[in-house]
Amino acid sequence: MHMENELYLRPGTPDDLNRDYLPKSIKDSDIVVNENGNNSQPYPERLREFHMELVPGQGEDSWYEYVPESYDPAKKTPLVFSMHGGVMSGWGQCIYTSWSYVADRDGIIIVYPDAHNKLFWEQMPSLESEENKEIAGFDVPAPVERIEDHKDCNFVLALLEHLKGKYNIDEERIFMQGMSAGNMMTTLFARYYGNLLAGAAGSAGPGSISLLYDEDGNLVNRGGPLGIWQTRPEHNGFGMRDFPREADIDRYNRIYWLKVNECGPKPEISIIGEDNFAFYHGRKAPLVFMDVKNRDHGQKLDEAFLQWDYFLSGLRRLPDGTITDEGSVTRRKGDAVSIAYALGVSHGWMGQEIVPLTQAPVKWQKLKYHGLNGGEKVRGEYLMVSIKDLSAAVGAEYIPSEDTLHADVILPDGRRLQFARGSIGCLIDRTMRQMSVEAIHRNGELLISAEWFMRYLFNYCVSECHDMVYITDHCAELSYFLADLLTDLLKGDPMPEDFKEARKINWLGK
C-alpha cells in the first residue's frame, strides 16, 4: 500500500498582493497563493489537460490527470476524483490540494474534472436553490430535477469508464473528494452512485439538509453505504448566519451518513494540534468527522494526506458491494488521555467514555475590585469541576472532610494536595501554591478550576471552546463543531430520530 517514493516540497513565488480567488496567472507557473490555509503549490509538471466529448450531446468535457512517475500498467492502481470548488477549475483543485504529492508517494492516480457548466457543479433542487444564486453572485446552473439528466454526474460516470479503459484501475479502490461546491457534488454523487466508490471525502460547506431527507423525514439515498469523511472548518461561515445554525446543519449531514452506514452514536475523539477528529465505526461503513480550529472556508493543504492516510487508503469495495477497512496508513484511534467537561452538563468525557459527574460544572470569575470604587475587573473565567470528579479522571484518591469544606487528594505519584472553601491556595505536600481562582462550594462539593488542576499538576494541554474544556497529553486546540458534537454526546442526545423539522434548517436561516 505505502511506497517509499521520495517527495520534494517545491518552493514557489508568492503573490500575496493578488486578491482574485483563482488567479489565471498561476496556471503553468510557480506562483503560490496563501490565505489562512488556502495555500497553493507551484503548478505540477506532470499535470496533463484533456478535452473530449465523453457524453454524446452534452458538448466538450475537460479534465486534468495526474499520473505518478511510478505508475505501472501491470498493477491495479487506486483512482481518486478530486472535485473543485465553485468558480474554480480542475487545475485549481490540483494546486490548492496535496493530492499530487500523495500520488507521487503512494502511486495512485488523481483526476480533476472541470464542472460542465459555468464553473459550478449542477445540483438537485433544494430549499436554498434560489438563495445559492444570490449568495455566490454568479450565474450558477439551474437545479436538475432528475439525476438521469444531471450533466456532471453523467460526465463523471463516462470519465470513470474512460479512465478504466486507459489505465489499470483497481475497481475496489475508487474514491471521490471535493471542496465546497465540489464537496456538494461529491456528496450528491455518493448519494446516487456511491455503489461505484469505496469512499468519499468532503471539505468545507455541508450539503443542504433538504436533499438528505424527504418531507416525511426519510433518508434520500440510492447509492447505499459508503466510507465518508466530512471536514468542517471552524470559520466556514459560507452563506450561514451563525455558529449554532451551522452546527445544526453539520449535525444532520453527519447523522445522515451515520444512519446509512449504521454507525453507533459514540465516536473515538482525537485532537492533534488544530485537527479535531471524531472516528465512527459502522456496521456497514465507517465515518470520520473533522473540524479544523481557526480555519476559514476552503481546504487545508495537508488535507489530502489526512484523508488518504487516516481513511481512504484502507477502504475497499468488494465485488459483492461490501465496504471493508483493511487498515489505513495511519490508524484511527482516540487520544489515550481524553477528558472533557461542558458547562452545565452533568456528564463528562473520560477515556473515550461518557461518565456521570457528581454535579454539572459551573463558570467562575477571578475578580479585581479593591480600589475601584465599587467596580470590578474580570481577570479570568474558569470552568469549575468538583474535586471528586477531577480526582476520578486522573486516578487520584479523594478524601473529603465530614463537612465537605476541606478535601485532601493523593495523586498517583504520591503528592498530597489540600483544598479549602474560599481559598485560592493549594497545599502540595508542605508547600503552598496559588491556583488560578479560589475553591468554591456547591451542593456539598468543593469545585476548583479544571484548567489549573490539569495544567499545573499534570502538565496536560487544556483547550477551551464553546463552554467546554478538552484535556489531553499533547498539543490540542478544541474547535467549535467538535465541542458541539461532544456536548450532544454528554447531554445524551447525539442522534435524534425525527428529521421532519431538520429539513427546515437552511443556510440563511429563512
Image (cartoon, rainbow, N blue to C red):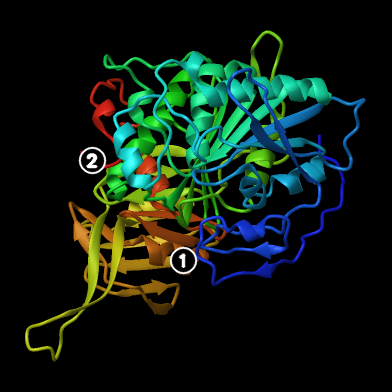
Q: In this rendering, does residue 415 appear at all?
A: no
Q: Mark 1 points at which residue?
A: 455
Q: Earlier in the sequence, mark 2 or mark 1?
A: 1
- Report x, y in % for residue 55: 63, 20
* Farthest top residue in view: 320
Dividing the image into 4 quarters, which one contains the C terminus?
top left
Q: How many labels does the image show?
A: 2
- Residue at 56% from the left image edge and 18% from the top image edge: 193
Dot 2 and dot 1 residues touching (CB under 8 Å): no
Numbered circle sitting on residue 509: 2
Q: In which image quadrant can residue 218 be found?
A: top left
Q: In this rendering, does residue 193 appear at all?
A: yes
- Report x, y in % for residue 24: 61, 56
**Of 265 and 499, the residue lying toward us:** 499
In the image, is residue 289 above or below residue 424?
above
* Farthest left residue in view: 374
Dividing the image into 4 quarters, which one contains the N terminus?
top right
Query: Spatial distance from mark 2 to mark 1, Cα to Cα?
Result: 40 Å
- Report x, y in % for residue 81: 65, 33
Q: How crowded is the residue under tag 1: few (<14 C-alpha within 10 Å), some, or many (20+)?
A: some
- Residue at 30% from the left image edge and 17% from the top image edge: 217
Q: How crowded is the residue under tag 2: few (<14 C-alpha within 10 Å), some, or many (20+)?
A: few
Name the amino acid type tagged 1.
Arg
In the image, is residue 315 above or below residue 356?
above
**Of 319 and 25, the residue lying toward us:** 25
